[in-house]
Image (spheres, coloured by chain):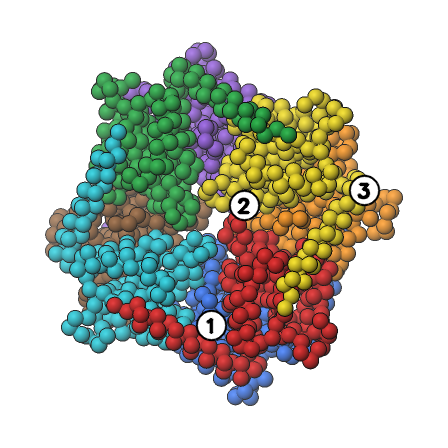
Chain colours: A red, B orange, C yellow, D purple, E green, F brown, G cyan, H blue
Amino acid sequence: MSETAPNAPTVGIVMGSDSDWPVMQDAATALDEFGISYEAEVVSAHRMPAEMLDYGRQAADRGLRVIIAGAGGAAHLPGMLASVTTLPVVGVPVPLKHLDGMDSLLSIVQMPAGVPVATVAVGASRNAGLLAVRTLAAQDPELRSRMADFQAELNNQAQAKGERLRR
Amino acid sequence: MSETAPNAPTVGIVMGSDSDWPVMQDAATALDEFGISYEAEVVSAHRMPAEMLDYGRQAADRGLRVIIAGAGGAAHLPGMLASVTTLPVVGVPVPLKHLDGMDSLLSIVQMPAGVPVATVAVGASRNAGLLAVRTLAAQDPELRSRMADFQAELNNQAQAKGERLRR
Amino acid sequence: MSETAPNAPTVGIVMGSDSDWPVMQDAATALDEFGISYEAEVVSAHRMPAEMLDYGRQAADRGLRVIIAGAGGAAHLPGMLASVTTLPVVGVPVPLKHLDGMDSLLSIVQMPAGVPVATVAVGASRNAGLLAVRTLAAQDPELRSRMADFQAELNNQAQAKGERLRR
Amino acid sequence: MSETAPNAPTVGIVMGSDSDWPVMQDAATALDEFGISYEAEVVSAHRMPAEMLDYGRQAADRGLRVIIAGAGGAAHLPGMLASVTTLPVVGVPVPLKHLDGMDSLLSIVQMPAGVPVATVAVGASRNAGLLAVRTLAAQDPELRSRMADFQAELNNQAQAKGERLRR
Amino acid sequence: MSETAPNAPTVGIVMGSDSDWPVMQDAATALDEFGISYEAEVVSAHRMPAEMLDYGRQAADRGLRVIIAGAGGAAHLPGMLASVTTLPVVGVPVPLKHLDGMDSLLSIVQMPAGVPVATVAVGASRNAGLLAVRTLAAQDPELRSRMADFQAELNNQAQAKGERLRR
Amino acid sequence: MSETAPNAPTVGIVMGSDSDWPVMQDAATALDEFGISYEAEVVSAHRMPAEMLDYGRQAADRGLRVIIAGAGGAAHLPGMLASVTTLPVVGVPVPLKHLDGMDSLLSIVQMPAGVPVATVAVGASRNAGLLAVRTLAAQDPELRSRMADFQAELNNQAQAKGERLRR
Amino acid sequence: MSETAPNAPTVGIVMGSDSDWPVMQDAATALDEFGISYEAEVVSAHRMPAEMLDYGRQAADRGLRVIIAGAGGAAHLPGMLASVTTLPVVGVPVPLKHLDGMDSLLSIVQMPAGVPVATVAVGASRNAGLLAVRTLAAQDPELRSRMADFQAELNNQAQAKGERLRR
Amino acid sequence: MSETAPNAPTVGIVMGSDSDWPVMQDAATALDEFGISYEAEVVSAHRMPAEMLDYGRQAADRGLRVIIAGAGGAAHLPGMLASVTTLPVVGVPVPLKHLDGMDSLLSIVQMPAGVPVATVAVGASRNAGLLAVRTLAAQDPELRSRMADFQAELNNQAQAKGERLRR
């Protein structure tokens, strides 16, 4: 985790517990599809508050360009990271056993003026990964081109599904 | 704000912005009624994250025994303080312009296992003050006695209201 | 259940039915981890109203310092106990078959001014136990020290999870 | 219709605070329209728990046949009264400043098996009065006849409104 | 207690489909426990509107004293019956596959002024039966006495559960 | 209101009370814009149940082709009409003082299989009128052409708003 | 899919993915029961936006008279189709893994003034099919007659269920 | 930073109607504070579907790097734009008269896999602007530095508020 490392990952995927990994790994898969390097870490807002703030503070200098943070319930991780980094933070509301992720969603999206979190749907870590790609692509024409290809492929798949369904 | 000060306040009332004070001052009034010393501070989780964690870490050593934290929307202050102090933290969901405090409530109460926040009703800072008194009274028979008097007075007032209403 | 007994338990864990015990036993486990003595009782607000009020009224004199009360649906037990004791009452919203605990949460947390209940997350009896420990620790430096150790251990476990996850 | 007192009221209208009277007085008006005697009292579950249980326990012997109870927020009054009386209890969810009465509704209607509360709409104390009339009319043919007249008059009024609106 | 038929049932239990019977039969069981006669019928507001209104209109004359109506989703049966009978109507919100009964609850409880429905908890048909018993007991001292015995037995059972749980 | 009248209206706009007219008149305005004849009536499901069913049963024979029904709270009017007519029924959830129309929406939209109601947004009676127009236009090319013109005009207005806003 | 084809289907059933077919096929079954021709297609608002708009724009000219569109989550398909067709669009909220279809319902029903979607219950594609039949029947007396037969058969089935249940 | 036009704006702020401008202009103010060029347009998903898709398709080539889209109710604009652009789209849920923005929030955030929208809080267009800045800053060290200054200023302001409040 050296700073300004030549091979530093571009996206940080963090979550409050390794039990969130089954939800969050779809973000990693999406980044893999675009060849974006990433790291995955447990950074708990409530069990590792100091390390969590350090992670956020050092993220930009370590070469990260986007942080994806998943959390459930009183989900404070995305918002707290956003308060100590200048990078865009994508928040993934992880659904817990009760309340179907509505608590996670509101805890992440309803941030006060000054500190935004880019929130995606409940459990939608794949979209979090894709949002990170779009963020990086905003100033990378080649990556935008690959996102356009990806969207064309989505279109192809949907059309193929339609072929099978049509009646 | 020296440490282990002889006149250190017993309860810390903190909030994310001075705009929360009209809601939070009822906590102060309740503490005044029981002669409990307190301090009131703006400690924003999202705008002052480092100071916020420092506040929580130093609270017990400075002589505080209970922290009352009010916050609205994606309300992270009570839970983040609870993660860095051993003191009981009372959370007050402050209602914002939209969603009627439901976001604030869920963001405060739905804490993960290991880090509890003692949550009161939406906007109920007076009850936050009274919960702090009960917490202090748990090991202070004289204060429990005054809480019993307070409850008797609530009973008297309710009975008097009944007299006026009765028909 | 004699009064002022030398070995009287410090925390009372009560619930409306023994069917709540699978949820509520996590509170007992948390207290065991800190060596806090407790008792567990069925005290139903709706099926044992007189005994319920007696339980609350006698709690402080019997040596209890905190009451943890779990209830589901129209969950009246925590609030009714709070109305007849000077002790802090921790409320655990027990989720029932329908509505996912939202009814239990609102029935417990939305108490009127004058009678607070320290509410934790839906089904979060472990946190209720830990909140009782913090309440007792507020004036017990040795117990605060053990809570600090507990928090350090939470941190260790989270870091270890991170080690296993890291990639 | 009383068993004991010659002039005992037939319906008890109770509420947690006199501030609920503006909502609850519609129940009284409805009873007046049917010539049903009633009493109105402040009986707070949380500020007068002993008196509240006494009220419920003595209600039937005092000649009451139905209890109408209004409460807001963590609304425990209707359910607690139902636990200590054999009479039907009609619950009126009083809306508070936040959450629009949803907390009041769930706290009243979601009673556990064994102890029902006959719940009406948020703020619908007029319907609570009319439900008390129907309850009394269940075994009073003359009162049923007047309820039929009342329903015919509702029909007439609705038709008259239709005349004015028709286009 | 009938006016017309010598063996007419006292309570009508109706529902929109026989698929509601697994939920509604608990109402019948409760009535059996108190020796109250009842009938059970499918009376669908939306599939049998004419028969449904006839059922309501004739209920009182056939000797019924209370109607218990269960329905799910856009649950119109209890309210429509209440509009054509002078009897008290108890509404049971039957939970469907989605929305967990919240739609059923609001469709039943939020009746307009003039036409009340005595609503019980989601799926709580046992309490609907017990509310019918209380309604009949309002003017039947012997039945009130049996309800008091029932409540004493609830207390005994709760105490016995407490014995098994106590630790 | 003769049957098969030569000048019979094409759309029936009905509501439970004339107090709903301020919401419902937008449906009439929309129909006026397309030159569709209509009638407006108070037809209360709960205060005029017999007349309400008659209205529904006779609607098609009287020449109506679409019914627009507005109702609030436990909103039974649209669904009950749908149960006795073969015509399409458009339901408008009228928001009441509490719960912001959510009860009205669920009471109207969540109809059981067999009896659909075409539900529009809370308070959206203008869209109810436009949906009636589209229903009539389904087999009327000239009316479809006017709907296309209407949509082009919506487009023009939106573009004009954009002109004023653009910066 | 030729335009103005002699055997063109009358109803278009579209959905965002073939995974919605298990929910949506009930619409097809309902149309089959009435002998209404239909087509079923995957037309994804988000993966096939251009094709989706084309589908809507050409629908009327291809001979379709009603479009049934099912979608889940941020369900944009019904509303977007409604914006480019003059035909009535029936929206079916498909429930996803989280939030029980409430997001789908609100995303479909809460359309702005000018562009209505005829929304049915969560998952209620059978009712969507029946609403399409009613729409077609609005100006087809023979089809209205068959809908009346269908309703009579619903009544028969409900009565038969009642026979089996009656006790 | 544009690729084509020398003076092309970097951020597009779009909304469904000019009535959304009072909410959306805070996004413009935030961009002004960072010297980011922007354009503001009315682009209605439902009233200008073709222009809306064109706007999205051309956005990247016109030099835009981020799109901010505000919409209310069945809010389809952000998601539809995201389906036809490779740029990151920030969605602002605009609260309407009813439902307090919950419909807007769910309609925007609950996007299906493949097409993410970066959602901010209800009405939080200032944060949408700041999220656009962070997105641009992800690969612009100088802009990150200004964001760090901005955050330091937020901290200063919060501390100053604390000074005034402290007691």
Q: Residues within 10 Å of mark 1 (few under 14, many from 20)?
A: many
Q: Secondary structure at mark 3?
A: helix
Kindly indicate whether the residue at mark 2 contacts the one at mark 3 (C-beta within 8 angstroms).
Answer: no
Check chain identity for marks 3 and 2: say if they share one: no
Q: Is residue A52 above or below residue B22?
A: below
Callout 2 amino acid: His
Q: Which residue is mark 2?
A: D98
Q: Looking at the picture, how far across and down is residue E23, in whole percent? A: 36, 37
Q: Which residue is mark 1?
A: H82
Q: Secondary structure at mark 1?
A: helix
Would you say residue C153 is visible in this rendering? yes
Residue at 39% x, 43% y: name it: E95
Quadrant showing the N terminus of chain H: bottom right
Callout 3 amino acid: Glu
Q: Looking at the picture, how far across and down is residue F127, in whole percent? A: 33, 59
The label on residue C142 is 3
Side of F64 relative to C102 (left or right):
left
Check chain identity for marks 1 and 3: say if they share one: no
Q: Quadrant of residue C24?
A: top right
Tag nearer the camera, 1 or 3: 3
